[in-house]
Image: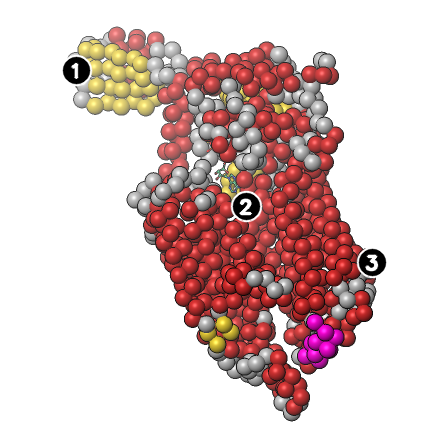
Amino acid sequence: MTAVIELAKLTKTYGKSRGIIDVDLQVNQGEVFGFLGPNGAGKTTTIRTMLDLIRPTRGTAMVFGIESSADPVSIHKRIGYVPGEFALYDRLTGGQTLEYFANLRGGVDKAYQASLIERFDLDTKKRFKQYSKGNKQKVGVIIALQHKPELLILDEPTSGLDPLVQQTFFMTLRETVQAGSTVFLSSHILSEVEKSCDRVAIIRDGRIVKLDTVDGLRDLAHHQVELRFAGAVPADAFINLPGVSELVAADHVMRMRVAGPITPVVRAAAQFELLDFVSREPSLEETFLAQYGNAAAAEAGTVSDGR
Amino acid sequence: MAASTQTLAKPFSRIYGFGSIYGKTIRDSRFSFLIAVGIFAGLAMVMGTAIGSVFKTPADRVAVDKLVSAMPAAMVNLFGNATLMGAKLGTLGGYMTWKYGAMFFLGTAAWSILALTGTLAGEAAKGSLDFVGSTPYGKRRIALEKLGAHLTLLWITQVLLALAITASSNTFGNAALGDQIPLAGAFAFAILVGCFAMFFGGLAFALAPLLGKGGAAGVSAIVMMLLWAASGLSIGGPLVTLSPFHWTAEMIPLVGLYAWPGVILTGVLGVVLLVVGVELFVRRDMGVTMGLSLPGLPQDLLGVRGPISRAIGDQLPRAIAWGLGIALWSALLASLVGSFTTQLTGEQNLTQIFSQIFKGYDFSNAGGWMQLYAELFYIFVGLAAATFVSKWASDETDGRLEAVISGTVTRARWVVAGGIAALVSVVIMTVLFALGIVLGAASGGSGAGDAVLGSASLGLFAAAMVGVGFAVGCLWRTSLAAEVTAVVVIATYLIGMFGPALNWPNWVTQLALTNHVGKPMIGQWDMTGVVASLVIAVGGIALGAWGASRRDIER
Ligand SMILES: Nc1ncnc2c1ncn2[C@@H]1O[C@H](COP(=O)(O)OP(=O)(O)OP(=O)(O)O)[C@@H](O)[C@H]1O
Ligand SMILES: [Mg+2]
């Protein structure tokens, strides 16, 4: 597998305030890589560093094996980029805007451009200022797609798009991947990453906290077990079982978190008079929120991100 | 893939259009280019026709010569070195240099400052530069194309200016009096103007990656005014040696005086600054600037308590910057009055010339001098007012307004709060101006005379311009409010300048507010102007408050 993107100890600070810290990750050719994180986590910072729009404080960002600050032009030739927050030229129409960026690239396939315009149902005659929010976003998306880049770098590309257009968008994305492109997609919506990505990195407070396949993330899920006993709660019998944590006992009820197989807990429970046994598997969404939640808990005790 | 299905930029669109960054920048600048050509080449044309009525006979010209030579060099030379010109001051080229040379220098440089801060830093701040930055062009290439586009337009404007000067002076000038300006002289003048523009535009361009658009434009404009005043007022010291106006003081091509080394130095340094700007843009993070923060401004001043204090907080940095700029100017001028008065006493016929030409002026205190330069002060505070309008208008043009008025603040309240804040800014600026006079005069050993009270007239004019801007912004659209205000200010100035000279119909000259203000710096107030200003100021804002609730909020 060839790495299309390789970030090594990538760090960016804005003066004293944190941007990202020691970000390490690899994106392989042909995969759709999800980059998840809450607001202000450092997604945009990471992406802008990869494109040499900003320069790393430490560490390196390699794209196509080229260090981003060494030869950004060679990288830019092969990518398409949707910035997370952008504006375009208020007084130009969507059509003029697409034409301009096609000209800056040179050699954009007109038929493909037209097919994208039709797919996304964009009225190219309107001035950018007059577009609705989602239509503005469509212009940005088409700019990134129209030259069939090898690597798509998308910073929250679906923001503002309605569900139908989002569907169109992900369908188009799948096609480009089938045609051999690689996608780096930042988002804070788990479900869209879950649907469309092969691997995911979760960034929090500027650091990568998890990097796994989407399936791997699911394995990460655990069971929330609740037992109700007829007699006193036999906490000692459970506390040392493999995979058990966060054990809480109150009255006749005992709650715990069980990672991995649930068998040891079931075996132990069988030795007691049980009134009820509830086991629940949290959704990926909850797992993800737990990751976010930890951040919130951790942050409460420490200094915030300096904004 | 067949070539026919690929987009291919048409060759012409690379020069003008969507074919290249250069072409698009040229296209984006087309209006400002037309305006610049209109103002500068137009001014040159009009001046040729005006000279005949300003100096009707050779005797008139001799009188002006005498007058000018009687004034202290420091005061005369603010507008081109009259001492060096000698008798040639009475020619078209001499008069044009002396009286309006600064308009060309400062005006063209201001255009470059605005263009060169707006192009990269402006786009970065807006957010479209991220797209351009991810296309297969290096940052250096992007910067050079954008820069190249402005320089192209700047120098085309200079060529047109040179042609206009030659055409106008040869058509309308009096050959016997030496009015005709050869092509070489006109081109030399245009080159001088272009070099100033490259120098100060270059300064702004170099600062823009560090300070962002507004900060870079503001700092360069202030530096420009300082260096101009320092050189013109012949203040010694380190500041004047840094001034391109000082280096080129002996270059007066419109009267055939050439001194190239200073021009070349200015031009070369301009290029150096431009290169620095390109390199800084290449090396620094895109869109990450330090900005110009005002350290330690208390919360109350920054204003988050309500719409009025918020609006004042928004305006304060501008109000203070403009105020300090104009105060410096008034202080410098006023400080020279003392020495001049000493020089004048005892010279009976000089005193006589002065009292003949400037009836009722008292040149023994600052007032007389302030009145002499009043027309420039009016244009200065008028343009300041336009920027106050622009700051207020940015609430809507930047998209903040929806959030503001979706709360409990009504549209009318937003307009009135903005209006009050703009008027407070005008007051701050005016008070600083008056303070400048008092301090300057005292330091030079003379009195301030009626000028302190007279400053209020500037405030009234600026307030009226605020009223114009608010009315336009609310009744029409905020995106044009500041521009229209600036146009009104400049039109007022031009009417005041050319109306009488060109015998424009009375009703036209009456349109200029400045023709109704009297001579307040020497104590002659015209109440028509006072009342008119107040009515326009208050009426404009009131009309705005009414109009704003009757139209759509722009997105
Ligand atoms: N120009 C800047 N100056 C100072 N700090 C900045 C700057 N840009 C970003 N930051 C800080 O860097 C951190 C990461 O920001 P970034 O924009 O990368 O977050 P993000 O993950 O893209 O968030 P979002 O989901 O809101 O887009 C934030 O704490 C932010 O405040
Ligand atoms: Mg972001």
Q: Tell me what residue is drawn at x 57 percent, y 64 percent.
A: B496
Position of A47 relative to B221 (above/below): above
Q: Which one is nearer the viewer's eye here, A154 or A4?
A: A154
Secondary structure of residue under mark 1: loop
Amino acid identity at mark 1: Gly
User: Residue B516 location in percent, x, y?
Assistant: 49, 68
The CA span between labels 1 and 3 is 110 Å
Residue B47: name its quadrant. bottom right
Amino acid identity at mark 2: Gly
Q: Tell me what residue is drawn at x 43 percent, y 56 percent.
A: B467
> Pointer 1: what residue?
A231
State left or right for residue B491 relative to residue B5. Answer: left
Numbered tag placed on residue A15 in the rendering: 2
In the image, the segment drawn in magenta is: B56-67
Are labels 3 and 2 on one chain?
no
Assess disc 3: are there few (<14), some (14-19) or many (≥20) residues with their C-alpha within 10 Å of its C-alpha. Answer: some
Write down the chain letter for disc 2.
A
- Report if the beta carbon of the residue with label 1 is closer than 8 angstroms to ligand 1: no
> Pointer 3: what residue?
B184
The answer to whether the residues at label 1 and label 2 have Cβ atoms under 8 Å apart is no
Q: Tell me what residue is drawn at x 63 percent, y 24 percent.
A: A79
Which label sits in the foreground, 1 or 2?
A: 2
Q: Is residue B63 magenta?
A: yes
Magenta stretch: dominant secondary structure: helix
Write down the chain letter for disc 3.
B
* Quadrant housing the C terminus of chain B: top left
Which label sits in the foreground, 3 or 2?
A: 3
Q: Which one is nearer the viewer's eye here, A257 or A76?
A: A76
The CA span between labels 1 and 2 is 60 Å
